[in-house]
Amino acid sequence: MTAFMTRRKSLLVAASAALALSLSACGGSSTSTSNPPVAEKPSFAADTTMAKLSSAGKIVIGTKFDQPLFGQKGLDGKPVGFDVEMGKLIAGKLGIPADKIEWKETVSANREQFIKNGDVDIIVATYTINDKRKAEVSFAGPYYEAGQALMVNKDNTSITKPEDVKGKNVCSVTGSTPAATIVEKYGAVLVPAATYSACLEPLRNKQVEAITTDNVILAGFVAKEPDAFKLASDQTFTKEPYGIGLKKDDTVFRNWINDQLEAFDKDGSYKKAWEATAGTVIKTAPTLPAINRHSRLSAPLPLRQPKEPMDVIIENLPQYWDGFLRTLFLSVVSGIIALIFGTILAAARVSPIAALRGFSMTYVEIVRNTPLTIAFFFAAVVLPRLGVTFQQFEVAAIIALSAYTSAFIAEAVRSGVNSVPVGQAEAARSIGMKFSQVLSLIILPQALRTVIPPMINILIALVKNSSVAGAFYVLELFGYGRQLANANGDAVLWVLVGVAFFYLLITVPLGYVATVVERKVAIAR
Amino acid sequence: MTSVLYDVPGPKARRISLIGSIIGVIVIGGLLVLAVMTLAQQGIFDPTRWAVFQIPDVWALIGNGILATLSAAAVAAVIAFPLGLLLSLMRISDIAWIRIPTRIVLEFLRGMPVVLMMFFVLLVFATGSFVAVVAGLVLYNSAIFAEIIRAGIQSLPKGQREAGLAIGLTSFASRRSIELPQAIRRMLPSLVAQLVVLLKDTSLGYIVSYEELLRKVQIMADFLGPAYLFPVFFVAAVIYIAINFSVSRLAIWIEKRGSKKAAGGVMHVPVAGIPTK
């Protein structure tokens, strides 16, 4: 595959007048209305999947909503892209018009599960055919062949091949196949993100050296910002044949889709679908790859002993342990900072100086009412823009977590201050103590004692909140869990039980401490 | 406004306080201006970037997002609260074989990240994303509600329950008609605060690709291009803060109203902007 995008510079500089125009140029609204021909009353042998879908008159297709050029949700709520067009074409052959298709967003982790449970009828979602997946689902196609590539900043000359990223920060999506390849084969340091587009900001801020995934996805990003990014090389270093996922061993349906794909190629609708979507930026039109008609695996899978369910946990213990330590580290550091900062905020909240009170209140009100994900967004994406740069994303995570948690600590301490009987403060003042003395010697010690149980609850919440860091470039326990869940589609339950166990290893003892403290230290009333 | 924590400030203290306030405002204001200027230099306040908000579709998407956020939160709250109430009573039950298993379950639920529960429900029970989000929120928040209510009941003077039992009420009747009403009133601020947490936690639905406000905004930013990332996120943050702030205000209003009736002496610490009594 060679890639090739137009230098359509205009997109980002487009003035507001040109906005609507530029939107449709990014593969948007104009294609979303495309309606491929719908077959009139197609007939199928009874009891086939085709017959069922056709007579039901509707189909559920899983696709991605965040994959530029292939499957991306437009402003009108409908997905657009090459995958989407393929889905429409197939539905059309079943006699189902485009508006009767229900699009379901699939993420990399749940595609096999969605097919197995019948949540979707087919999946067209940049879905690479591989042996591991073939053990769970069947694939029609391939209908396109992509390959993994690297995208770097425009001015980068040091990275031209995958071997160049050894030991460097490379961003990719948690648990995705490209992420595993770049780490295991080429020794890169993975910076995990929730979506590929979330990788753009760290690359722009030079916190990562490269982004890696399939070339077509990267080409989409380059096409949108040709002045900022480029592909490290036109060569790809893996082959990613995209297939259409369907229920395992539904051979009749599979063969039928394969026939349709070949027909689309012949009648030109394959080419048309490409030109309307990905072809707007990738000029080289693809040819339909040779359809893989036998469901045989490319190499026999190593004979797997029927495994005990717990095995997946034991096998991956080192990864769990690493994730556990990372989560512990994030929680302990953020917890200490939050405790100190939160207590200071609470003291400021009751202080005689109006500005301190005002600051404390504003801070607590804003932070308490902001979702943690937005706090993370500001720490990881906006702060670097303000000149606060860091190479370790743990710093951003700690900033977000401690800034967020300290607001809750402040509130807990304040309510503790409220719970100290009035007489205590009055007595302290009547023996001549100053505000700082009243607060630090009389009120806060008593207040902290009553708030220890709620405070520990806040710390428990902090431990769990650290799991959000997984979506913001930090690898931790939950991130490992997602990776393992992806790699072990057949043992998801136990993978997640393992993750839960390691969280409980931190949170249950904390909860126990809370109970003991509550019993021993709290003032009896 | 007087406080028991410190004397009514005299002229000197007032002056010091005023100077302190002015310096504080200047420092914080200065930092903010610096931040805004740095961002402005990068063209973030360029009018073209904000022009997206002239597109009706953008607002339709945001509106759908708000609706999805609110509906998930509302359904979760309506299920979680009664469940929490029940769990709290079971947690302090006199019967050991109810109390102890409940405690274990609560410890377990309290100790698990919400994202993990959502992910678990989605993958293992293969539900839709809405159910996964609601289930994750219910599991976690009912445990927290239970803990809050339990703390409220146990913070009541012992005499309340003793008196209830002494006049011949059954254990449950005493809980229901004497302890719970006081406990819930006492804990209302915490309960409403937890409601805000629940509302915010809907944003964790990204993990199961539930399209609430934040996910919608993300999809929109992906579609429009990175230049619009900051504007759309900024608007989302403002919307979140506005919604949650209203709920928090409600909490403060309830706290104020409730504290008049609260049992025992509650010390009133002045809070800027909110006159206590």
Image (tube, rainbow, N blue to C red):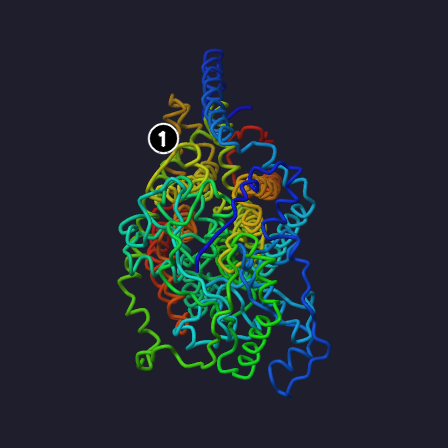
Residue B31: give x, y in percent of width and height: 45, 25
Residue A220: give x, y in percent of width and height: 50, 52
**Image point 38% across, 21% down: which residue?**
A432
Which residue type does callout 1 highlight? Ser
Residue A101: give x, y in percent of width and height: 65, 67
Chain of the residue on which disc 1 is drawn: A
- Please tell me how crowded label 1 is: few (under 14), some (14-19), or many (20+) other residues with Cα within 10 Å: few
Q: Which residue is mark 1?
A: A440
From where the camera sits, is residue A485 visible?
A: yes
Secondary structure beneath label 1: helix
In the rendered view, tell whether residue B272 sits above or below residue A516. Answer: above
Residue occupying the far top of the picture: B11
Q: Is residue B26 left or right of residue B176?
A: left
Q: Which sits in the foreground, A45 or A103?
A: A45
Q: Which sits in the foreground, A525 or B5?
A: B5
- Image quadrant of residue A261? bottom right
- Image quadrant of residue A481? bottom left
Residue occupying the far right of the picture: A40
Q: Which sits in the foreground, A474 or A414?
A: A474
Q: Is residue A502 left or right of residue B227?
A: left
